[in-house]
Image: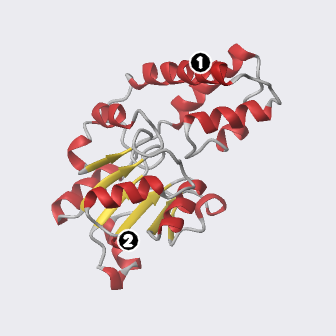
Amino acid sequence: MIKGFIFDLDGVITDTAELHFLAWKKLADKMQWAFDREVNEELRGVSRMDSLQIIKNHNKANVAHEKLMELAAMKNDLYVESLETLTPNDYLSGAKELLVHLRKEGFKVALGSASKNSSKVLRQLDAMKYFDVIGDGNSVSKSKPAPDIFLFGAKKLGLKPQECVVYEDAEAGVDAAKAGGFYSVGIGPAERVGHADIRFNTMKEATLFAVKSHFADLF
């Protein structure tokens, strides 16, 4: 039986993807590195340091570890500054309604995000009250597609992976959910999350009713 839900943050609860893109673009411009939306797609669901490695490799750049740490901190500062613009009006359509519905029905809810700024984002959205557990980039050492962040969330909720449904918008995130033995809901195009157990184009379509209907024998 399904007793809990675990959510990615960016692209599922709210869309901070554009804020991330702009922060990476500013950093890349400063370093005179090529960076565009195509490269940015490779960063979806990936940790900050791994994202930096992808951008560095794309530019065939040779950068010392100390400099990489400095660049990662710089990007984070740019991103965190931009988070001040987020408000409770910035949920993705359908996300807040789903979280409210899950609370009413008594499901346990965790966040499973690679972002180390998850709590800040949730506070800006006034969303902390909907989550029993916050799993983020500070919680585990291995990022998606390793299942560690979702396993962390399930353990903190006191649930087994097969008792949880994971909502993800990234290929690496769905891979992580499947690797951990979780049921998965993909948000986005088939070419990105079509390997999830069920896929919706938007969060607005991914209602509790729709998920219950698909996993009818699990509720």
Q: Position of residue 50 (x, y in %)?
A: 62, 39
Q: Element at badge 2?
A: helix
Is residue 36 at least partly visible in the picture? no
Q: Is residue 71 above or below residue 114?
A: above
Relative horizontal placement of residue 91, taking residue 75 as reference (left or right): left
Image quadrant where one finds the N terminus = bottom left
Q: Is residue 154 above or below residue 140?
A: below
Relative horizontal placement of residue 51, taking residue 146 as reference (left or right): right
Q: Quadrant of residue 128?
A: top left
Q: Quadrant of residue 101?
A: bottom left
Q: Which mark is residue 211?
A: 2
Q: Position of residue 142 (x, y in %)?
A: 52, 48
Q: Is residue 28 above or below residue 194?
A: above
Q: Residue at x 39, y 79 (%)?
A: 215
Q: Amino acid at mark 1?
A: Glu
Closer to viewer: mark 1 or mark 2: 1
Q: Quadrant of residue 97?
A: bottom left
Residue marked by disc 1: 70
Work out whether mark 1 precedes mark 2 in sequence or the reverse, and give the earlier one.
Answer: 1
Badge 2, how many Cα within 10 Å: few under 14, some, many 20+?
Answer: some
Q: Disc 1 to disc 2, how far (Cα)?
A: 43 Å
Image quadrant where one finds the C terminus = bottom left
Q: Amino acid at mark 2?
A: Val
Q: Position of residue 100 (x, y in %)?
A: 22, 54
